[in-house]
Image (tube, rainbow, N blue to C red):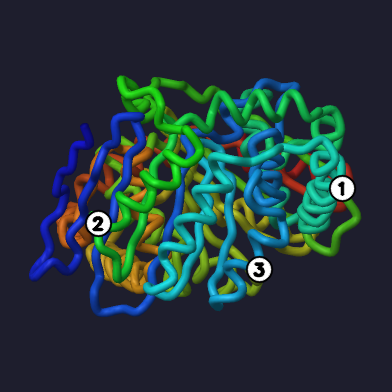
Amino acid sequence: MARTQTLLKGENGIGTVRRTTLPGGLRIVTETLPSVRSATFGIWAHVGSRDETPVLNGATHYLEHLLFKGTQRRSALDISSAIDAVGGEMNAFTAKEYTCYYARVLDTDLPLAIDVVCDMLTGSLIDAADVEAERGVVLEEIAMTEDDPGDCVHDLFAHTMLGDTPLGRPVLGTVDTVNGLGRDQIARFYKKHYDPTHLVVAAAGNVDHAAVVRQVRKAFDKAGALSRTDAVPVAPRDGTRTIRAAGRVEVQGRKTEQAHVVLGMPGIARTDDRRWALGVLNTALGGGMSSRLFQEVREKRGLAYSVYSYTSGFADCGLFGVYAGCRPSQAADVLKICRDELDHVAQHGLTDEELRRAVGQLRGSTVLGLEDTGALMNRIGKSELCWGDQMSVDDMLARMAAVTPDEVREVAHDVLGQRPSLSVIGPLKDKQASRLHEAVA
């Protein structure tokens, strides 16, 4: 029997989040926003590049492409034209720990979006001819990424910090691994990881929860995907991975106009309670035009156009990084400034003014980032898949506002006080490269 729960109760039904778990282990979460005329429907799969073996690196992303290529009921053209015909948008993305497929449509067209996306997820043919045809598309996407060193350097940084592990490998895979993937390998991967127990359905906007449940159940039943009535959903990921990458340096020589650098260290897992303080710290350090790094590197010295800090949180570990793109001759100076700022904050924390400004910026950007149904669908879908729970926006804002100077000092000491590692892509000469090593000494 299906089980329905109200996870968050909004005022007059607005912002109410409900979850229904079907007998086949499929979870369906919705957030109701009657004031809009749109709805976003998505299906989240509990699979990402970290679930791949070295031989299968890139299979998750390759499969994402193939699910758009056709089912027993629809061709690739049928899939795209159905959503185009109602003015909707459809897409997907693959990350290291999950994959998401979604469509955004008018509220009256939600049943169509549900039927199309559910059909893709449950009835994909994974045809051998499509596998070969799409291989070229995936290789072009890899080539496009390789042409952007400002993007590639983050993959290099993940490798620097995590090595040749599932989390350290690129989500897209490599030319060699993608060329080595065959239809049977991808089909087995699809069957293993797209079971209803590994999926979360999420819908947000002008939606009726009961109607969404009926339509999703009908679509999955049509595909025979809910036959295991005793199945239970998979639990969120957990673990205690330790990153050991202190002082590592990876330099990738390339003929680019700029040197692209990431200086960073181990961060914290996404479930760590310190994530709120780290979010405030990250915002103050490199989250905007008033941040320390932007002011010191760009505004005061004009050494870089783009400079920022960021965090990546996984189920069992995390990364903290500072990125800058600058002329190769200035890379060492930029890194010294960044290292000095990190060391200073690690020892002294933030000023009261910086803390106040960072909290305000973080709270404002959080709310503004949830102003459309797509963002709402992302929030509830990811929360269900990664945490197994939901937190209201008001509770999130309250937790940010409650961050104290002591919490920021503690997380700054714990994270920024570690010896950093360094990843660089650019046309560096031997003397310039050796100077960069000083930044992690």
In the drawing, what numbered circle is on residue 81?
3
Residue 416 visible (yes or no) = yes
Give the side of residue 310 with respect to residue 179, left or right. left
Distance from Cα at disc 2 to Cα at disc 3: 27 Å
Residue in view at x 60 percent, y 52 percent? 336
Does 298 appear above or below 326?
A: below
Q: Residue at x 58, y 63 (%)?
A: 307
Q: Which residue is mark 2?
A: 209
Helix, strand or loop status at disc 3: helix
Q: Amino acid at mark 1?
A: Gly
Q: Residue at x 15, y 53 (%)?
A: 8
* Viewer-proximal residue among 362 and 64: 64
The tag earlier along the polypeptide, 1 or 2, is 1
For the residue pair 263 and 171, the one nearer the viewer reads as: 171
- Packing grade of label 3 (10 A; few <14, some 14-19, many >=20) is few
Q: For the residues carrying marks 1 and 2, which lies nearer the camera in this image?
A: 2
| Sequence-first disc among 1 and 3 | 3
Q: What amino acid type should be assigned to the residue bearing mark 2?
A: His
Q: Quadrant of residue 241?
A: top left
Kindly indicate whether the residue at mark 2 contacts the one at mark 1 (C-beta within 8 angstroms).
no
Q: CA distance from mark 1 to mark 2?
A: 40 Å
